[in-house]
Image (tube, helix red, strand yellow):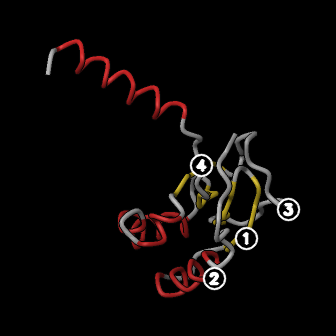
Amino acid sequence: MPMNAKILGLAGATLLALSTPLVAQPELVMVEQDGCVYCRRWHTEIGESYARSDFGQAMPLRRVDLHDLPDDLSPARAVVFTPTFLLMDDGTELSRAEGYAGAELFWMQMELLSRALPSERPAAQ
């Protein structure tokens, strides 16, 4: 195949990929703060394994500071406790789990939160 054809094929594939509607993925937002012993415990016991879990694949983790919540998040009510885990979809809260009392309870909470995930997602515009 001539070099020009390869370049044109690559350019066409790139344009197709860019024109395909993106689908925003729900995310698990961990609201934490400096000095939170329960946040530290979560990072020690769960932190590294979360991303590799089925829950981490379905609800990627995003960490935010309690005192500096990003403008793109709209929790249903104020976040008071840390850690608080917010299941967010396009900036809107679907569900939450407050606190951290150990790995076993955390994974049970993730099972409950995952039930709030939309079963079918429309393409983002």
User: Residue at coordinates 56% horizontally, 77% vertically from top-left?
Assistant: 110
Q: Is residue 55 above or below residue 104?
A: above
Q: Nearer the viewer, mark 3 or mark 1?
A: 1
- Cβ atoms at labels 2 and 3 below 8 Å apart: no
Q: Are marks 1 and 2 in contact (CB under 8 Å)?
A: yes
Residue 117 shown left or right of residue 3 in the figure: right
Residue 125, by quadrant, is: top right
* Of marks 1 and 4, the one in the foreground: 4
Q: Tag 1, which secondary structure?
A: strand
Q: Which residue, as the protein is rendered here, is positioned at the far right?
A: 77
How far apart, in angstroms, are the residues tagged by discs 1 and 4?
A: 20 Å
Contact, mark 2 vs mark 4 (Cβ under 8 Å):
no
When asked about the image quadrant of residue 101, the answer is bottom right
Mark closer to the observer (2, 3):
2
If you read the primary sequence from the N terminus, does the residue marked by circle 4 or circle 3 appear first?
Answer: 4
Q: What residue is drawn where x is 68% and y is 55%?
A: 122
Q: Which residue is mark 2?
A: 112
Tag 2, which secondary structure? helix
Q: Amino acid at mark 1?
A: Ser
Alpha carbon separation for disc pair 2 and 3: 19 Å
N-term mark: 2 or 3: 3
Looking at the image, is mark 2 or mark 4 nearer the viewer?
A: 4
Q: Earlier in the sequence, mark 1 or mark 4?
A: 4
Task: For label 1, count other residues whose C-alpha is less than 10 Å away and answer few (under 14), some (14-19) or many (20+).
Answer: some
Q: CA distance from mark 2 to mark 4?
A: 23 Å
Q: Amino acid at mark 2?
A: Leu
The CA span between labels 4 and 3 is 26 Å
Q: Which mark is residue 77?
A: 3
Residue named by callout 1: 95
Q: Which residue is mark 4?
A: 23
> Residue 34 versus residue 47: which sits nearer the camera?
47
